[in-house]
């Protein structure tokens, strides 16, 4: 059996940051003058806007581009409650999520494919309180303060993570269903696929 290797420089990744603002149902980021507007958790904590990227800005975490959320009347993130997000059909390898959790949380995300198949993958997110990553996530942002409804708590950090979920089925993915777990919040979503370029012709020896 003859195997053909594909050099690394012949493979490239493509990323598709997804617009998810239509699913926002929670406000987790607040200005210092409006700390009572945040409702990330039951205590009304929130991330300080001044310690995070500007709304609608294109950011990059560990090489992955995201569109940082722009607040809407409904909020600035998805508090997971089984929402279905329709995706442009395509062969993807990873889902990248800019996320945070009210406590260390583990749940399941459903992946829906063109032929009706559904796969279930784990979504694990570490606590937003200053603590180490428990599930191997990439730390996206750490704030210097945390907002309470009636004051700013200096020196108490809030953490936002970059977590990824594999897409292993070789079919076009058409949508995802988020878990029914209101402790998990999603701020941004990016799809990743690998495009492998066909090898070029083998070099020939020059003949005299």
Image (cartoon, grey):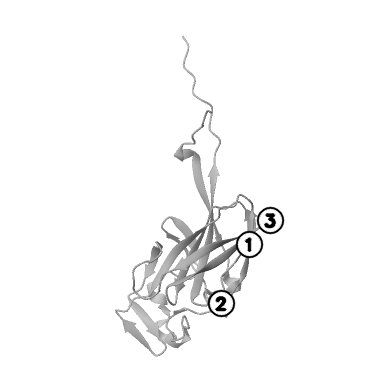
Circle nearer the viewer, 2 or 1: 1
In primary-sequence order, the first of circles 2 and 3 is 2
Secondary structure under tag 1 reads: strand
In primary-sequence order, the first of circles 1 and 3 is 3
Residue 144: name its quadrant.
Answer: bottom left
Secondary structure under tag 3 reads: loop
Name the residue that disc number 3 marks.
114
Q: Please, is residue 202 above or below residue 165 in the view?
A: above
Tag 2 near tag 3, CB within 8 Å: no
Q: Which mark is residue 72?
A: 2
Point 49% across, 23% down: residue: 203
In primary-sequence order, the first of circles 2 and 1 is 2
Q: Nearer the viewer, residue 47 or 3?
A: 3
Name the residue that disc number 1 marks.
175
Point 52% across, 72% down: residue: 70
Q: Residue 196, percent across and down?
A: 54, 41
Tell me: 19 left or right of 8.
right
Circle nearer the viewer, 2 or 3: 3
Q: Which mark is residue 137?
A: none
- Residue lying farthest to the top in this orientation: 208
Q: Residue 103, percent across and down?
A: 42, 76
Secondary structure under tag 2 reads: loop
Q: Nearer the viewer, residue 181 or 21?
A: 181
Local crowd size for mark 3, using a 10 Å CA cut-off: few (<14), some (14–19), many (≥20)? few
Residue 148: name its quadrant.
Answer: bottom left
Q: Nearer the viewer, residue 121 or 182?
A: 121
Point 50% across, 73% down: residue: 185
- Residue lying farthest to the front in this orientation: 1
Tell me: 131 left or right of 15.
left
Q: Nearer the viewer, residue 50 or 139?
A: 139
């Amino acid at each position: 059996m003859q195997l053909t290797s594909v050099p690394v420089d012949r493979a490239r990744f493509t990323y598709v940051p997804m617009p998810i603002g239509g699913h926002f149902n929670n406000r987790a980021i607040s200005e210092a003058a409006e700390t009572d507007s945040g409702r990330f958790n039951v205590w009304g904590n929130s991330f300080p806007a001044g310690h995070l990227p500007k709304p609608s800005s294109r950011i990059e975490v560990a090489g992955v581009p995201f569109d940082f959320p722009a607040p809407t009347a409904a909020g600035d993130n998805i508090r997971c409650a089984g929402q279905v997000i329709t995706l442009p059909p395509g062969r993807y390898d990873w889902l990248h999520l800019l996320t945070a959790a009210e406590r260390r949380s583990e749940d399941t995300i459903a992946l829906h494919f063109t032929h009706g198949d559904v796969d279930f993958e784990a979504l694990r997110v570490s606590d937003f309180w200053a603590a180490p990553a428990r599930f191997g996530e990439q730390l996206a942002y750490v704030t210097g303060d945390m907002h309470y409804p009636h004051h700013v708590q200096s020196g108490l950090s809030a953490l936002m993570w970059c977590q990824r979920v594999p897409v292993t089925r070789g079919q076009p993915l058409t949508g995802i269903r988020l878990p029914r777990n209101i402790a998990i919040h999603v701020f941004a979503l990016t799809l990743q696929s690998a495009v492998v370029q066909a090898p070029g012709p083998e070099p020939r020896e020059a003949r005299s």
